[in-house]
Image: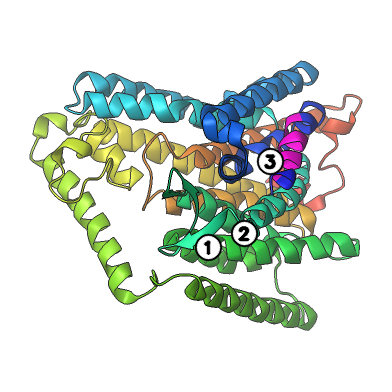
Amino acid sequence: MFVLPAILLAVLCIVPLARPHWGVVFLCTFYCLEMTLIATAAPFRANFMLANIIWAIVLLLASIVSISRRPDLLKNLTTSGGYLLVALYVLILASLWWTPAYENGSRIVIEYSPSMLLFAICGPLLLRDLDEFRGFLIAFMVIGSLVGLAMMLNPDFNMNSGRLVYMLAGKPVTNALGVGRLGGMLSIAAALQRTDGQPFLLRFLRFAAFFIGCLLALFSGSRGQIIFSGVIVLGFFAVARPIRDVKTFILSVLGLVAAFFIVQFGMSLVSAETTINRWEYKHIARGGEVRLANVLELIAAYFKTPSAWLFGLGFNTFSVITSGEKEPYSHNILVDALCEQGLMGLLLLMGFLWVSTRSCVQLMRYNSAVGPRRATAATLFAFFTFDVIVSMKEGNMFSIDSMLMFGLLASAFVVRAASDDEHQESGPVAHDADTTHADDPAYAEATSA
């Protein structure tokens, strides 16, 4: 079963050098592709860092190619959201000086920083505007679906305790959060895209990507990703595809019914493959109790230390104060930002979230006309919202990589759109890159307002 993962890896190593937006596809599918490579190929199993090294080299080369062709893409890193992130992470690194968890904190920084920097720096350098983001979405649905199939149909993978795993040295191994994220993103992208009047192949791709995404999320065993991706699809579906006539309403209802049966089918498969039902109330309640206890414990320690109210207790303090189950972090970035980086850290993080959300809303206004561009803007907004919600129940400040990327992309796209609009109004000779919104009356109305 190494053939398909090998082909996918080859494609993702070569195509981004010619089409940089494919580099973002590599970013968003890597964690699951890495699992598949380790499970099926001895070289990757013998050296866990091999796939990561290849990934980093390809993305760096793709970024160099991208900015060499379009140097103005460097401006994507100089938005207000980017400056807020720089200030936030400078504060986090500085807090290692006073944290009681220097060893644990330093380990997390060293372990997670490379991938976070690839998302936060390379990602924004690989996409220019919404048109390229739509190209990314189509490629993502293709590659993401194939990666999902390479896992679910692979005999080297099996269900263990409600999760899709592979065996390594006789022990089950998985990246449940990575699998759940890919499944959630696939289902969101497929549900929100518009393929009206498009070739049958593209419409079939949407259906296949949604089906595979739902199954992948369910097989991950990650309840949060499953629930939150479903909520995002329901919440953003009408935003991407406004219901303005009877036909659209009927198609929307049929789509939701089909989605329900797909999820039911996936649940039956998961239940048949495991003796542990992670959806039983007692398991869900236990997980919720542990996360709530984590949060309350960290908040209590923060308020007991007035000297830490401004700049925090220090990065990863939670790992040394927790009295319950061994946890490396509280699994809630807002609480982490407040308690470990203080009011300054919380303000910087909230500032980034505010700027990114405002940018997503502006993109929706610029592309308010019903059609593919509106659906694409809604998908970017949905991806960012999905990552923000998920970050409230998992991860730490160095594992919110895709959230940072999508937030920075939204800010960059808004700045780019405003700049293109100014160039059109000033009257120079229009170039292709500057006429992206020229035929969109809704965009012109929104920007003039």
Label 1 – label 2 distance at C-alpha: 8 Å
State whether residue 445 appears in this view. no
Marks 1 and 3 sit apart, C-alpha to C-alpha, by 21 Å
Q: Which residue is mark 3?
A: 25
- Residue in view at x 92 percent, y 25 percent: 429
Q: Residue at x 73, y 41 (%)?
A: 8
| Picture residue at 56% right of the left edge, 66% below the top | 235
Q: Picture coordinates of residue 201 (x, y %)?
A: 87, 61
The one of 99 and 161 positioned closer to us in this rendering: 161
N-term mark: 1 or 2 = 2
> Quick check: marks 2 and 3 in contact, CB under 8 Å?
no
Asked whether 265 falls inside the magenta stretch, the response is no
Q: Which residue is mark 2?
A: 152
Dot 2, crowdedness within 10 Å: few (<14), some or many (≥20)? many
Q: Position of residue 99 (x, y in %)?
A: 20, 26
Question: Could you tell me what secondary structure mostly forms the magenta stretch?
Answer: helix
- Per the image, the residue denoted by label 1 is 219
Determine whether, in the image, residue 314 is placed left or right of residue 42: left
Nearer mark to the viewer, of 1 and 2: 2
Please say whether residue 405 is visible from this viewpoint: yes
Q: Which residue sits at x=52%, y=74%?
A: 267
Residue range corresponding to the magenta coloring: 5-13
Badge 1 element: helix
| Image x and y of residue 243, in percent | 71, 74
Q: Secondary structure at mark 2?
A: helix
- Tag 1 and tag 2, C-beta contact below 8 Å: yes
Closest to the observer, 75 or 104? 104
Residue 322 vs 10, above or below: the answer is below
Amino acid type at circle 3 is Val
Q: Earlier in the sequence, mark 1 or mark 3?
A: 3
Asked if 309 appears above or below 264 in the picture, the reply is above
Q: Disc 2 or 3, which lies upstream in sequence? A: 3
